[in-house]
Image: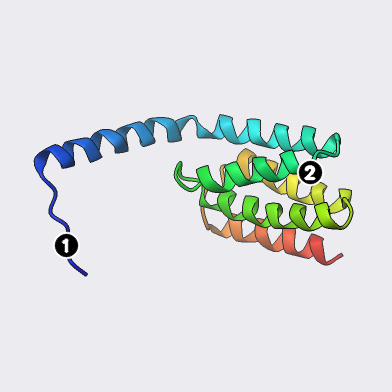
Amino acid sequence: MTKVKFSQRQKDMLQKAQKIIDSEATGYVDQLRNHIQSLKKSIGSGDITQAIQTCHHMQGQAGTFGWPLATEIAGWFKRILIHQQKASIDDKTNEVFLNSLENMVENNLKSHSKDALKLIQNLEAALQK
């Protein structure tokens, strides 16, 4: 792999961009809470298309702002919702995912830790029922 050499101007621009991302990451937990509320509202009203779109946004944003576990769960939930869109809504499964997302935010489970692994295992176990 070739090492890329950046000019000082490029380095300054990258540093500035990173500062912006870091600044946004600090408040991203509030955006996650908003996404979860949006999911509840969409699912509650039967608007699966909107719920899928919200999961898609979470999946795309969360990792950038330091929440890779949210990216993983949102992607998983999005696939489940796409399936439900073709079949039928499964309220119990949706509740399990929403509770898992809330648990993740409440416990600040940003990445793959022992607690995050336990959350995923509990999610998988609940889906087996």
Q: 70 and 7: which one is in front?
A: 7
35 left or right, relative to 99: left
Kindly identify the residue that appears in the image at 76 percent across and 52 percent down.
Answer: 81
Give the mark, 1 or 2, whose residue is nearer the N terminus. 1
Q: Quadrant of the N terminus?
A: bottom left
For badge 1, the amino acid type reads: Lys
Judge depth for marks 1 and 2 and give the one in front. 2
- Badge 2: few (under 14), some or many (20 or more) residues near its Cα, within 10 Å? some
**Image x and y of residue 7, in percent:** 10, 44
> Badges 1 and 2: C-beta atoms under 8 Å apart?
no
41 left or right, relative to 109: right
For the residues labelled 1 and 2, the Cα–Cα distance comes to: 45 Å
Residue found at the very far left of the displayed protein: 8
Query: Which residue is identified by label 1?
Result: 3
Kindly identify the residue that appears in the image at 81 percent across and 39 percent down.
Answer: 43
Q: Which mark is residue 70?
A: none
**Image x and y of residue 6, in percent:** 14, 49
Q: Quadrant of the C terminus?
A: bottom right
Kindly identify the residue that appears in the image at 51 percent across and 34 percent down.
Answer: 28
Q: Which mark is residue 48?
A: 2
**Image x and y of residue 50, in percent:** 73, 38
Task: Determine which quarter of the picture holds residue 47.
Answer: top right
Q: Secondary structure at mark 2?
A: helix
Q: Secondary structure at mark 1?
A: loop
Q: Is residue 16 above or below residue 103?
A: above
Kindly identify the residue that appears in the image at 38 percent across and 30 percent down.
Answer: 23
- Badge 1: few (under 14), some or many (20 or more) residues near its Cα, within 10 Å? few
